[in-house]
Amino acid sequence: MDDTNEDIKMPDFPVSGTITGLSKIMGLNDDGNTVLFEAIRLRGNSRGPAYTNINPENPLLNDYYDLQEPGVYLHLPKADGTPIQVTVPVAGYGTISAKAYYDGQYWELAQKDVLLPVVDVEPLIEEVAAVNQVIQTQDLPAGISAIFRSGSKVNAQIKTGGEFEFAKAIIHELQLLNPLLLDNLNIDNGFRIVANPAVRGLAIVDSKNRAILHFDENMRLQTLPPLVKPSDLYIPAERVMIEGDGQSNSVAARATPPLSIVPEGNAEMFNSGVRTQDVTDPALRYTSIVPLIEAASPDGSLGETSLTSLTRNLAASLLKSTGLTTADLGFSMFVSAPGETGRSLANLDVGSSYFTRGITDVQKAKEFSVAQNKTFAMIAVCWKQGEQDMTLGTTITDYKTRLTAYIASKRAAIKAASGQTFDPIYVIWQVASHNGRNVDTGNYPTIALAHEEVANT
């Protein structure tokens, strides 16, 4: 046995009367003398997580809370009488910890924010064609460790269908770094990493395609906006109609064969298709409403219109921003394309058969909605026309004047047919084929400029 320390003696303890003021703890200084240290400099027991509504009962000296959200903690007063407030870190920074310590009478905030460094995680994200092929199990590089905790390492298998594991690892580490950022995040098997074209980076999305986190092109963690609340949306009816009008592009000239075989976004059309004119017998055009699955025209020259991709992307945008489908939100999208190939604006104007069949589509959709006890509204017209007017040499002024009058007339006719009081939106597709059509004017984009001027009014 080692007896070298058995003869060392401690100086006499001070009498209790000399220990006044703050609570103290006795210990040895560097020189071996006995000293009293203020207990306020020590940290006591954790009382667990706390939110802004915390109202502590009988805290003990030096107890502390882990503060879980930014905001004012009204029941945690500081020495100056004001409540503790956890601030939101500035852009590019994250809160590594936020704690409230009790000194026996008041609370003291200790918030630590750190710079989130630019890191490169892209080498860890690889797409694999072979099902269930495992690339490798690897530790995060030192660079990405810095974004989480010093010395942190995460083993992650990156494989087809298994990128969830890597996404979960990232989220887990971020929760350890900053519980304020991902408070109460429920990680489920739908989490995965996807490309994020909007910021040329990566996003971690959940099972409903809602972005939980994203990284910019330099792989810096970005702050995400909150989800849109359904109550913030204006959905005017249970069946909303969108019309694609104009000439060849509106009716899908050369867009053959149709590719979409599964309806998405609760989208609908007449039994005769988006182009009711494909059925020659008017009595057979409006017999029912069916899911939106487009077919080629009888002569094979017209295919799938942009209305299918429009409804698909509108539904996807709603899902991403609200986490809800169109069915969840209680409405469907109905589409039709009454235009005609090779027609000028004058050919399509008020009084033409093309104008009339567009309004007939609206009337019939309204009649079906009433019969099905659904509310109905026509919300938008996508205008795709102008090439024929370029060929004819229509001037900017003439086209602008005629299109402005046409939109006013069409809106009035739509409101009369649907019973709605608001104007449908006009989405104008700007033509870009002047190089082959405006040869006599030096390829000047007359109709494209007219489109711009009308859109800006």
Image (cartoon, grey):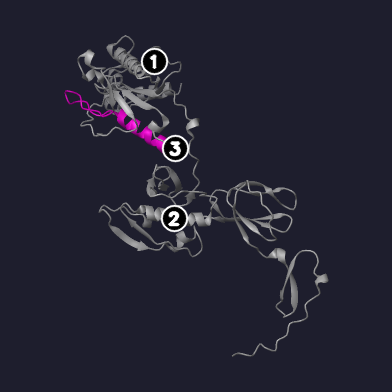
Q: Real-space Cα distance between discs 2 and 3?
A: 22 Å
Q: Is residue 318 magenta?
A: yes
Mark 3: which amino acid?
A: Ser
The answer to whether residue 375 of the structure is visible from this angle is: yes
Mark 2: which amino acid?
A: Ile
Position of 233 relative to 345 (above/below): below
Residue at which label 1 appears? 418
Q: Real-space Cα distance between discs 2 and 1?
A: 51 Å
> Counting other residues with Cα less than 10 Å from the Cα at mark 3, is it few (<14), some (14-19), or many (20 or more)?
some
At a point 34% along the width and 17% down the height, the residue shown is 371
User: What are the residue bounds of the magenta stretch?
Assistant: 292-319
Left or right of residue 406, residue 230 in this image: right
The answer to whether residue 432 of the structure is visible from this angle is: no
Position of 413 relative to 166 (above/below): above
Q: Position of residue 456 (x, y in %)?
A: 45, 24
> Counting other residues with Cα less than 10 Å from the Cα at mark 1, is it few (<14), some (14-19), or many (20 or more)?
some
Q: Secondary structure at mark 2?
A: helix
Residue at which label 2 appears? 170
Residue at which label 3 appears? 321
Q: Position of residue 311 (x, y in %)?
A: 34, 30
Mark 1: which amino acid?
A: Ser
